[in-house]
Amino acid sequence: MPGLGTTFGRGGATTAPSDLLNSDVILIMGSNMAENHPVGFQWVIEAKEHHGSHVIHVDPRFSRTSAVANTWVPLRAGSDILFLGGIINHILQNELEFREYVVHYTNASVIIPESFQDTEELGGIFSGWDPQKKQYDTTSWLYQGVQNASNSSDKNPAEMSGGHSMHGVDSSTDLSTYEQDLTLQHPRCVYQIMKRHFARYTPEMVERYCGVEKEAFLNVAKLYCDASGPEKTAAICYALGWTQHSSGVQIIRCAAILQLLLGNMGRPGGGILALRGHASIQGSTDIPTLFDSLPGYLSMPKFGPSSRDLASFIKANKPRTGFWNNFDKYIVSQLKAFYGDAATKENDFGFNWLPRLTGDHSHQAYWLDMLDGKMDGLFVMGQNPAVAGPNSGMERRGLGKLKWLVVREMVETETASFWYASPEVQSGDIRTEDIETEVFLMPAAGHVEKEGTFTNTQRLLQWREKAVDPPGDARSENWFIYHLWRRIVEKAKLDPRPRNQGLLALTMNYTLEGDHREPASPEILQEINGWTVADHKLLSGFGELKADGSTLCGCWIYSGVYPSAGRNRANERDPKDEYGHGWGWAWPADRRVIYNRASARPDGSPWSERKKLVWWDEAAKKWTGKDVPDFTATKPPSYVPPPGAEGDAALAGDKPYILHADGFGWLWVPVGLNDGPLPAHYEPLESPISNPMYPQRQANPVGLNRARPGNEYATSPDARFPYVLTTYRLTEHHTAGGMSRTLSHLAELQPELFCEISLELAQELKIEHGAWVTLVTARGAIEAHALSTSRIRPLKIGDRLVHQIGVPFHWGYNGLVKGDIANDLIAISEEPNVRIMETKGLLCNLLPGRRANNVVRLQEYHSIAEGKTA
Amino acid sequence: MIKDLITRWPVVRQILNRADGTGVEAMSEHTLHMRPKNDGAEVAHSVCPYCAVGCGQLVFHKGNKLISIEGNPASPLSRGRLCPKGSDSFELTTHSKRLTKIKYRRPKSAQWEDLDLETAMDMIADRLWESRNKNFAETQDGQSLMQNKTVAHLGGATLDNEENYLIKKLFTAGLGMVCISNQARI
Amino acid sequence: MTDSLTNSVTSPVPYHVTKAAFLTDATICIGCKACEVACKEWNEVPDDGMIWTGYSYDNTQALGASTWRHVMFLEQPAAAGPQQVDMENPFRWIFLSDVCKHCGNAGCLEACPTGAIVRTHVGSVLVQSDVCNGCGYCVVSCPFGVVDKRHPDGRAFKCTFCYDRQEAGMIPACAKACPTQSIRFGELAELREAADARVTELQRRGYTDAQVYDPLQTSVGGTHAMFVILGQPEAYNLPPAPQVPTIYLKSAWTSALISALVLAAIVCGAFLF
């Protein structure tokens, strides 16, 4: 998410699956789109069959996506930056970039100060590395001439970041005062630094360390790069094959850089389709049940000088230029939504009632606290960490250290039944009577039993109507939170300490409907949309927000979804055009292809007739076209900002990336990422080889591996674990299986856990097709059927043959079909920007036979593995 | 009436129509009057709860009972189509292992017990309040902290925006819970 | 009305055909099995057992009384037309959704002694569950191994062509769900033409072994569920020359008649001479 957010200004897919009909080339990598987004994939098939699109799939496995692609290229799991960096280098060395786009719409021309040193000069790290703190001071990454009036008196700011807010914003600097060389010749302009940085990412390196033959690599590079320029565009589709890596954000950065270099962003058939995995995971990032952001990607206050009071907080988050200059309007309106009339100018609109962050409060961090007995309680709503969490065996042990656990679900998941049904309990390692956790398993309403919105992967809000009541005591989460709040507030009324002021001020003024007294969802969406306080008039967009407390708005990017009473745009089903306007409502402002200013030339005319999307209408003096312009409608292409201009007015008429202080697409990220202004190849946390690009820096130096007993790592390489493991999904099941293993029609399609191994490995280890095998990593051991197939290949990496093994992660100990839990094999680790764990590209071993006697004795397996490979 | 009975007899229909006994003449009443099970049902417009494509769904129901779920052809995203999971949404909602009552486990117990909804809500509110009393930190070094780090929340990608909003509002803005996460991190 | 590109009904307007047909195209199938599930959900067909076969991703195995759409998975050492697959040896993974063929001359229908199996006005072959007595004669008479008896129920079941849906102007559940419209539903004559056009197009693009499977030249007399496949039908467990078993009845009865007449002549002759 910050990969896209820092590069372009907003995290999230930049286009819709249906726009793939306009793509000349579709590159699918880090994704198995046909299996995990089958109905979205219809657009790929139609593009290929009826519009002449060439579909390229790059993936360690030949999956159901590969089967229908025009070109499939296998590569080693974990070598994506090497591969993509190879294409970047190919473009720069051969001057294949879409020059005009790059010069005008990206920061390629911006000059970087001499104090910056690249990984080429420092053996794999950038300048600013603090080996004690294991962090970067990113000052030397800023543009030349830009001052850093540092706010880094904040304690450990990197430690408190989670990558989900205010991408690329640091209001202590003024990025708009850059220097540039439009000829791209200056040795310290971004373009030239990139050329040097990627110079060793050659086709030979790709062949040797990705396992991709030079011809195959150059074929992909040519196909993809040819689909560039005014007349052609290419799209990139990715999913968790890219995100679940210790350098996941930088992998995505490579794709973002490629799409900027080739001028594909903001154009029909271009863009980046970040394929998210759950019905409303986009929504749960926009309105975040995440620790590090407030709704609309606003920063959570971090304990320290920047959150001493509202004025300091605004100062730290309101850059002078670009759209984030409106930060104060967004935060004040949100505080009014939270605390209502009690939020006044005098009390900073209740800012001091918000909690401050004091460190890393992410899933992995608080789970480790749970393991250490520091947590009282946990609410789990519609998630199943006992199966899907990283190092799920440790997650289950963590649950056993809670005082109380509330699980809200449609079925009894593994998370709810860990205390009697988990492998650790079944094997006798842990005894039920020793687990003190009090457990409340509460039935939850399903999607047709409550009304509300989901936000899908293309940022589209769609309303769901309610069909039937939830059965028995099942209720929605709205009901649960509201009636919990009601009880808590009764207690707070009896406790007049200042600590409860915010709690008592919290607004929950929703009409209660029906016998169950369900809070009315439309009213909640209206609050998210916002209204003027004085007359409760609904707002038609974030442009109406004010910083003086006269407006109220739960989430500024959703403002406009409910612009008047009775008009819920998420509930509209009348598509009028190619982009589906009239069906649902997309943020921001119903723009379907964001950054679409870039679909026109600097002078406002389309790049070509074939690829026109949005353009300047000189007669009407506004931007017009097939989509809502992602630009101030009346700002002409020729607009030059007057000196001292602020906010959006400070951005010229040819700057499409309006969230950025400089209006550029960022090839180079001066602020906002913890591990580098440019991507660099590091090996995964466990790797069969040492880093061929930077031998002194094996893995991402800023990543956290959280190593501790129970969460050990293999060495890189490791004689005990010679094979590369990757985990993935199948189309028949859904994530942790709670919504598929419990259903007969899905369970019968894939009833048992299997792992995919190459025919070569099966032969070498004398494993019969279908036989039981045990997969072992440094953390766990599971049993699975061996499915030997030519769809998985050993690859020649360096001087050796590296075998890859794949395992789907859907199984658990509940449901109609059961199986071992694949995530017991993976580690709790944190990528440095978003803190996601690494599930692809780990090391494992494979032993014949079932897990003996249902007992997990890891040390035994490790000795066997050592003996076997010795 | 006798005439009616006779003319409905398949053999008679076959002879009268000079048919070979494999067409309409051999159809039972049930077949002759066959209608789809969602005939005359009400339709709710919904969205598939599985992946993030957001396929449109038509939810057929009558008298608070679910009849069937299929794709919505009017959706420009999905054009009426559904993958195997979306196609199984009816079973997802109606299968026999759906929880309808609360299951409660006492500390150290080896079994589930029943618990009514209101009591469960009271108990949960009690525990939340107890943790807050013990562990809530109002200030640190004279500055507002307003934090309880000992109660956490997990989940959100399968929930509605409205639900995530209320969770964030109560847990974070109201109760100072900073340990909040969901599948977006995973 | 239907899309020009697909057959998904894009408006609530009812869609009726005179002669119903399926065209199932292996070259755009992604093996997702939405068809299997959509069919079972609509027709309330029970699960067919939780059996892991290890045979590629196919755990369904075959059509039967409780499986009316079956997706086959073929891993083959051949190239799929011009597809670029970075392997030393050619390789392709083909998926095809098999279904009851609703034969022009249906073996099951010919064999059924109770009149349970009928031909509907849209030309489909329907097993009437309220008439079926479970004799099982249909099972051995299908040249494709489609219809079967369900245990312990005892009656015979197979694809109904979603006759109930068609009566109300809706298309079959599998065709509606199919994400890539590999399964198309429509008029038999139109889909026969579309099949030929598709194969011509595929061959032009380099899929030299593309062909239509629709055994018109046999006693089955063509099916109302045609397929576009790559390679030989045998690889898909489709008989290249299926016959309706009762086709042999004509010659059998004729031979019997002749034998009877000859025997009668001999017996008469024995008395005369």
Image (spheres, helix red, strand yellow):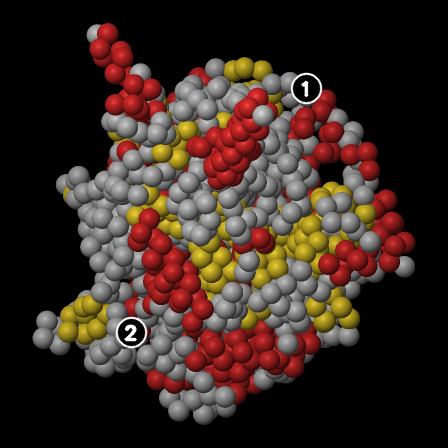
Q: Can residue A295 be seen?
A: no
The image quarter in which residue C132 lies: top left
Q: Which mark identifies residue A611? A: 2
Cα separation, mark 2 vs mark 1, equals: 65 Å
The quadrant of the picture occupied by the C terminus of chain A is bottom right
Q: At numbered mark 2, what does the secondary structure look like: helix, strand or loop?
A: loop
x, y (%) of residue B85?
47, 41
Q: Where is residue B82 in the image (x, y as percent from the top left)?
A: 40, 44
Q: Which amino acid does label 2 sit on?
A: Lys
Label 2 marks a residue whose chain is: A
Residue nearest the observer in this picture, C13 or C143? C143
Horizontal side of B185 relative to C177 (left or right) equals right
Give the amino acid type for the residue marked by disc 1 in the picture. Answer: Ala
**Chain name for mark 1:** B
Is A312 placed above or below B95 here? below
Q: Can residue A751 be seen in this view?
A: yes
Graded by Cα atoms within 10 Å as few (under 14), some (14 to 19) or many (20 or more), the crowding at tag 2 reads many
Closer to the camera, A520 or B158? Answer: B158
Dot 1 lies on which element?
loop
Expressed as whole percent of the image width and height from the top left, the position of residue A687 reads 72, 63
Q: Residue furthest top?
A: B2
Q: Please give the name of the residue rendered at 23% of the width and 12% of the height, measured from the top-left corner.
A: B4
User: What numbered label is drawn on residue A710?
Assistant: none
Q: Which of A145 and A824 is in front in this view?
A: A824
Task: Tell me: residue A744, above or below residue A733.
Answer: above
Q: Badge 1 is on which residue? A: B110
Q: Residue at x 45, y 44 (%)?
A: C220
Front label number (2 vs 1): 2
Query: Residue B35, percent across and down?
Result: 29, 27
Question: Residue at 17% across / 40% down in the picture?
Answer: A565
Q: Is residue A788 above or below residue A623?
A: above
- Report which quarter residue A144 is drawn in: bottom left
